[in-house]
Structure formats: C-alpha cells, structure tokens
Image (cartoon, rainbow, N blue to C red):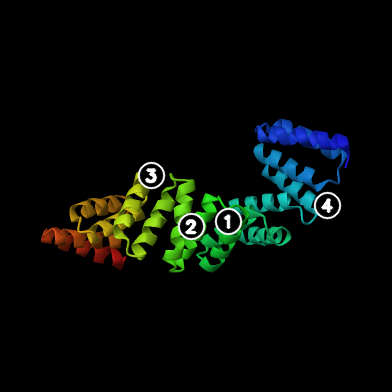
Amino acid sequence: GNPVARKFAEQGRVALGASKFADALTAFDKAIERDPNEPLYWAQRASALDGLNRPDDARAARLRALDLDGGCAPALMGLALSERASGNDEDAESRLKQICGLDPGNGAAWFQLGDIYRHRADWEHAFAAFSFAIQAKRDDAEALLGRGEALLNLNRSAEALPALEESIRLDEANGAAHFLLGAALADVGRIAEAASAQRRAVELEPMRAGAWFNLAHNLHALRRDAEAVEAADRALALRPGFAYAHNTKGLALAALRRHEEALAAFDAAIAADAK
C-alpha cells in the first residue's frame, strides 16, 4: 500500500482512540485519497462517521469497504452492530456468521451472535456462541455471564455455576451475574448461598423485581419469614401484578401465623394469575 496513506491512516486511528472524530475523518479521507482501494480505510472512516452521528454515511463507507473486500471484518461488524441497534437482528446474524466463518477466533462476533440467540431464548445456540467467545477471550465477563445464563435455562445449573462465579470474579459489580448465580445455587439446593447472592443482586440493582422475589423465596425456605415478607413487598412495589411474589408473601405470612394477611396475599396471587 501507499506509505503516505498508511501514515494518514495511523493518524486517524490515534484520533479515533482519542474520540477526536472530525480529525479522524480528515485523516482517513486523506488516506483514501492516496489509496482508494484499501477496504480497511473505508471501514475506519465509517467508525469516524459513527462518532459524528452520521449513520447513513457510515453505512455507505462500510458497503464500499465490502465492495472492495467482501470479507472485511471491521466493515461487517460495524454493519451488524448498526443493524442490531435498529432491531434488524436477522441481517446482523447473517453478517456475524460470515465473520465467524472467516475468523473463528473473533470473540466479539461470537458474543454478538450469542446475544442475538439470548434475546430469542435460543439457549442451545446461545450456549455454543458464548462458549466460542470465551475460547477467544477467557476473561470476558459478559460472555461468561451469557454462557452461565444459557446453561441455567437449559436446566444445567450445576454446570452454570463455574461460569457465573468466574464472571463475578472478573466484574463483582454486575447485579445480573449475582441474580443468575443465586438462581443456579437455589436449583442445586444451596439455599443460604442463593439468598446471599440475591441479597447482593438487590444491593447492586434495587429495581430488579425478580431478584427481590428470589430473595423472598429463599428466605422463606430458610424460615426467615419476616425478612421474606419484606423482600416480597419490595418485589411487589416494583411489579404489583407479580403473582409468584404474592404467593410467596402469603406462605411467609402463614408461617408467621398472620393468617388474614396470608389469605389476602393468596387472593392477590390468584387475581394476578388470572390476568
């Protein structure tokens, strides 16, 4: 390639890294002027245009990169991400599969595929994609979380535990990871640890109704029923029609011999379930 073009492209990459998108665009334009047939310059130009909030121009630059090289991974990934952002997962999936076929070690592409499958609740494919992402980058906390969630939903909770625990080791402040870990621990009968995990989940994400419900359920199983009622109330404050939370509250109230309140909670559960 043209050595002057390479120099301008390097300047553009430095400017991109510093979020100086206008400077980056100028540098990539100069690189393209000297070497218009280098697809990577067009793909990098698109990244600068993204930063300048010019999505149509960015898409055109990526398509130009693909005209020059149909396997240009940065252009394919950029298009896939923009398609995902616009809700077009079908086309994004096709581009991501193309990247993975060309470069099986592209962990970012495998992760995005896994995320598409996760949103579809296609847990077998999600498990496979997140596993490939982890092979590419073993300390990817989000991919480990995705693998753990897939295993949990495949009723393989014992296998989910190591992935979720490692995800938390890498990113302790991720409430979703503690929530899923708690669910897996409860599935394998480790209720006290499950309650601790859900307690940490609600500390990190107090608006997560599911974690408050799981905490209530675990506390009731541990015969800590006054605390269970409090946790169920927190879940219901966030999601008033949460039938399972009404039911768990009723069970805890009955264990506390607060029978009239328990009956009211059970009635609320039936009414919520009927909707």
Marking on residue 68: 4
Dot in front, 4 or 3: 3
Residue 123 can be seen in this image: yes
For badge 2, the amino acid type reads Ala
At horizontal 27% and vertical 59% (from top left) the residue drawn is 217
Count of residue discs = 4
Dot in front, 3 or 2: 2
Q: Are marks 1 and 2 in contact (CB under 8 Å)?
A: yes
Residue 53 can be seen in this image: no
Marking on residue 204: 3
Near mark 3 (Cα within 10 A), the count class, few <14, some 14-19 or many ≥20, is: some
At horizontal 57% and vertical 64% (from top left) the residue drawn is 128
Q: Earlier in the sequence, mark 4 or mark 2?
A: 4
Quarter where residue 133 is shown: bottom right
Q: How far apart, in angstroms, are the residues tagged by discs 1 and 2?
A: 10 Å
- Residue 37, percent from left and from top: 86, 46
Q: Nearer the viewer, residue 1 or 45?
A: 1
- Residue 64, percent from left and from top: 79, 49
Marking on residue 170: none
- Please say if 231 is above or below 13: below
Residue beneath disc 1? 134
